[in-house]
Image (spheres, coloured by chain):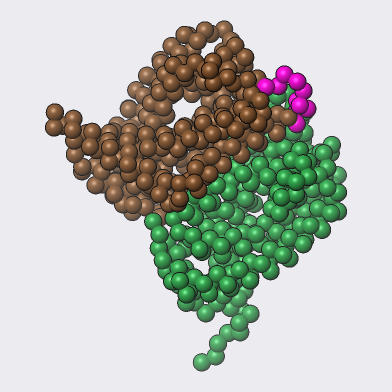
Amino acid sequence: MSEAIAQWRGFKAATRLGWKISSNWTQPLIFVIYSVIRPLSAAFILVIMYRVISGGAPGTGAYLAFLVSGVAFWSFVQYGFAGLSNGIVEDRGEYKMLKYVYTSPAHFYVYLLGRGLAQLASAVASAGIVLVVATIALRLPIDPLRVNYAQLLAASFLALLAVIGMAMAYGLLLLQAVDAHGYGELGSGVLYVISGAIFPITVLPGVLATLAALSPLAYWMELIRRSLLGSQAIRMFPALSDGDVMLRLVVTTAATLLLAHLVFTWADRQARRKGLIDMESNW
Amino acid sequence: MSHPPGIRIFFKTIVARAYPRFVGSHRNLTWLVTETLLPLIGTIAMIYVYRALHAPARYLGFVVLGGVLLAFWQNVIWSMATQFFWDRGGGNLELFAMAPTSLAAILLGMALGGVYMSLTRSAAVLLVASTLFGIGYSTASLLPALGIFVLTVCALYCLGMVLASLFLFYQREAWQLADALQEPIYFLSGFYFPVRSLGAVVGGVGSLIPLTLGLDAIRQLVLPGTPQFIPLTWEVIAIVVQILAYGLLSQVSLRYLELQSRQDARLILRST
């Protein structure tokens, strides 16, 4: 029982710490603006690109909704993946506290899970504001009363587990580098291309399309669009029912978590063996 | 004991500050990877968006040229604007302030080295993306396009020098501020679409950033059929004015903010 309490306390402390680090550099209003300005701008870029090509023809709402929903929910990956993997490197190099986390009673997984979930609040706010603004401004066919919230939440929960798992493994791998600036963003950039967030994965060439089909993010994006738009959603997997897509999300998430665990364990062992946990890095 | 003349120290400072960037551009492999791949991946993602929309081939060229200048913008933000912030954190800024030279010379050296560094990255983006996606460009106006490119980069780094002095005022928030100057600028500068699509007002505001007009002018020259935002001659004149204005403003703001920073002890105030 006391072990569970220690883990819970560690989780709470990690979540609070993660939230403070990411948000207490400014006033709440500025923080909200900062959280939404990037995804909102990214959505505007895609909207203009689409409008340039389609010429504002009628019946374009469904494709705009495809683009906007992908960008809006991408915040979860941006914050969860890049934020957490950068956080691990910052904890070592900038704050010089990673070694204390290793020696604390809470399991390292628990700490990282808390640190990752702290990013969730920013991502939720960002996704919500982008969706609301875009739905109103672009008259997207999203009806809040018809959204399949259960499917949306279930899919997002699974995808977040996968994202945090990948970020943990990737962050530990980054401990190998003396200077890992920008590598969190680089990793999330690669995921952006193979996730189906802003274009259907069928556009990708062979190898990348196969990689994308093995990634839980593509199925998550599909379920987000189906949940938000119902029958009006442009589908990346038209042959699959909602249940089939959810099943694939479950399977790919489980496989991703297993792979992430193996990579994490290997990287953790390497880090301990080579003395990388308290190494001076380029800050 | 005789002292070297001020002008000699000024130019030696420029060379000395540019030198680590020349050397570091190929010695620091981790930077080489991120600085090349980050704009390249963004460019590839946007190319696939156009491909999914079955856009004409010249739109892919829009994106690649945007990606080329994106490498410069990222360098201006992360290695010019925020540089004094990093230098302060690393303890170098106080050494710069004590040295018998001017911060302006140090900034010019940073800019010179930064241009070289970005040039190598943007050349890689141009080469790889154009080859991968089979994108062609008109070479009939290549020389004028290169001339405008040089002017745009000069104006951009003058703006970078203005931002560098402004960032002396920031502490922890400098990182987030630099972060926030990415997608909004990509949008305002029309990195991935014709600038004209932004309309007169948004495009006009975006034109305060030298990339906007430079990118539009270069596209007009090497990608025939690009919708014109404003006539080419006006764009060139505006960029030259920006070089003068931002160059002057950078010197004024640098002196003022350096004085303020000395008074507020911000030159040595580390932030984490």
Question: In this image, A274 relative to B239: left or right?
Answer: left
Give the colour chain B carries in the figure.
Answer: green
In x, y percent, where is residue A133?
60, 33
Where the C terminus of chain B falls, by quadrant? Answer: bottom left
Q: Quadrant of residue A266?
A: top left
> Is B70 included in the stretch rendered in magenta?
no
- Image height of A213 relative to B37, above or below: above
Tell me, yes or no, if residue B26 can be seen here: no
- Image height of B3 relative to B244, above or below: below
Outermost residue toward the left? A2
What secondary structure is the stretch in magenta mostly built from?
Answer: loop
Give the number of callouts: 0
Residue nearer the viewer, B200 or A270: B200
Image point (37%, 52%), residue name: A94
Tell me, yes or no, if residue A103 can be seen here: yes
In x, y percent, where is residue B242?
73, 60
In x, y percent, where is residue A167?
40, 34
Give the colour chain A carries in the figure.
Answer: brown
In x, y percent, where is residue A147?
52, 17
Image point (37%, 19%), residue name: A254
Outermost residue toward the front? A145
Image point (57%, 13%), residue name: A230
Image point (43%, 51%), residue name: A25
- Image height of A274 relative to A58, above or below: below
Question: In this image, A132 relative to A91: left or right?
Answer: right
> Is A58 included in the stretch rendered in magenta?
yes
Magenta span of residues: A52-61
Q: Quadrant of residue A68?
A: top right
